[in-house]
Image: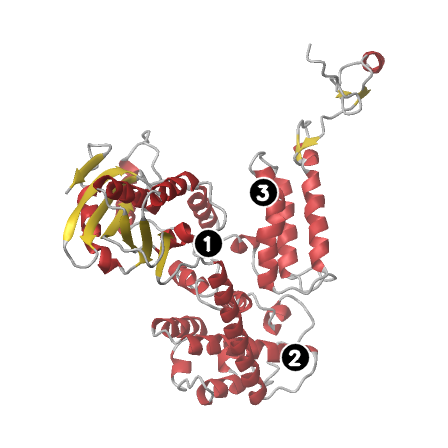
Amino acid sequence: MSGEMVNLQKSFAKFSPNTSTDYRDSLANNMCLHCQDSLGSYLGLPVDMGRSKVEAFGHLLDSVAKRLADFSSLRLSAASKLVIINSNLVASFNHVLSVFKVPVSICDKIDSMLARFWWQSSSTSRGLAFRSAALLHLPKGGSPRSSWGCRGLMQGMSALSPGLSWKVGYGSKKFTRDGKFSTKTAYALLVRQSIVSVASVPVLDSWWKQFWGLSMLPKLKKFIWKLLHDALPLTTILHQRGMPVSPVCVFCHQNCESVSHLFRDCELVSDLLVHGPLGFSRNSLLDKSFGPWFIDTITNFRVVKNWHGLAFFVSFMWAVWISRNHKVFRHAVVSPTLILHVAAEWVSRGEEALAVSEIRHSAHTPSFPLGICWLQGSESDALDCCLLFDGAWNASDNTAGIGWIFRDIRSDLVLGGGLRATRAASALQACLCALKMAKRRGFDRLQVYTDCAQLVSILTRAGGKDISYVWLLDAIHDIVKSLNACNIRKVPRSWVSPAHWLVGQARHLIPPYPSKVLVI
């Protein structure tokens, strides 16, 4: 016997509901265990469930409600709320959705709670949704679009479909370019089919994809999204919903407050667009309706790469909205100078945020030495060979080609070289192969040239090693220690072009050979 004992404090007995109470208590007393009706939960997931799935997953609603209550007291922007929803709230129960098929009623209630949290302006308000929740589910870049040839075939199939019959296929997905199924493309397709019209202005998915990729404050991006979807609480919309507000514009007190009037056609705003820093012509404001004019304006700024003009244009629209709200809720005095000042202030905020983002990005980007880095020996050691190597591989099947050139250190005389067709998925494997060939040829005083900055960073880094390439790094260091002198240098691609040409030749040798070496 192992001698192990049962922990009676952590153990219990569970009986079938059909078991009588007397028999249940008697058997539990004989085993010195207490009875429980459920096996409980493991890692937050219920182990056993009864007939009512809604009751079993009701704790998800309580968990989401508690988290929402913690964040509702904070005055967060729409962009901040979206980050919290995706990174915190959804992540809190995402593991449950990956294991169980949660009832639709539970999912709908959670979706309603998240949507209300995103639309509400304070913890005391219930929130006013100006668009359906289905619109919020759409991917930022729109649904993936099939290729031109596939779309032509689908149009042809629609004409032939009345005379065709169903047949078992081979499982490829016709709504993606590569024919491979993914949950992302399937979800986008289903969501797109369930929505007939989502925007007040017809906007291409490609335009939204480019817009979301612009370097702009997330707050401003969400504002533009609401503006183009008529999701701003304008007085005209509120009046149509039966609220006791005047639909007249608060600036001119003449026309109804609509998106086009407030952000372009109002006399105050149009004068600023024409005579302000943006310098629009009066005719350009009248040629098109607001939606196409707004989209074309952002597109033109992006095409000519006038990023400052784009930032000021979006900030100007945001300044108009802020000034309007101050006039409505605080009875503030609004002047053209104030609107331009607010717009310039938000342009400065965007530039500061972009500068901070670049600093943080550069801090997390692996740095590499710009000069020569000695892996073995010192600058006083003489070198006799320059090793140029390069590698390339196909990420789908890891088929790779490696090429290396040995050159005299004091001239362009080629001392030898080679190529290899193999299986690889890292620049470290190309470096290891080239160093082995140099060791085999008897070169022990090497100057290594590579165009891979990440490789130089990994080889010269003094910190911890990534488990994915630790054995490769150890093998390279063993070879380097056996040499008398060795340094490595990051060089432009043109410097290793001979080795790169050998790589192209090596990749032609892969089929049908699993590993092929050719030494010059």
Q: Nearer the viewer, residue 505 or 28?
A: 505
Q: Position of residue 115 (x, y in %)?
A: 62, 55
Q: Could you tell which of marks 1 and 3 lies nearer the N-terminus?
A: 3
The reply, left or right, for residue 455 in relation to residue 410 is: right
Callout 3 amino acid: Asn
| Residue toward you, 80 or 169 | 80
Residue under numbered circle 3: 94
Mark 1 or mark 2, which has the lower sequence index?
1
Left or right: residue 398 compared with residue 242: left
Could you say whether the residue bearing mark 1 is in a helix, strand or loop?
loop
Instruction: Say which mark, if any, is on residue 282.
Output: none
Q: Look at discs 1 and 2 and give the one toward the viewer.
A: 2
Circle 1/circle 2 CB separation < 8 Å: no
**Whole-percent x and y of residue 434?**
27, 44
Answer above or below: position of 412 versus 41: below
Q: CA distance from mark 1 to mark 3?
A: 28 Å
- Mark 1 lies on residue: 196
Residue at image position (29%, 53%) is 448
Image check: 91 left or right of 52?
left
Q: Given contact means CB atoms under 8 Å apart, are the residues at marks 1 and 3 in contact?
A: no
For disc 2, the marked residue is 326
Image location (x, y in percent) of residue 474: 40, 41
Rounded to the nearest angstrom, the CA distance separating label 1 from label 2 is 36 Å
Quadrant the C terminus occupies: top left
Query: Where residue 145 appears, x then y in whole percent?
Result: 36, 51
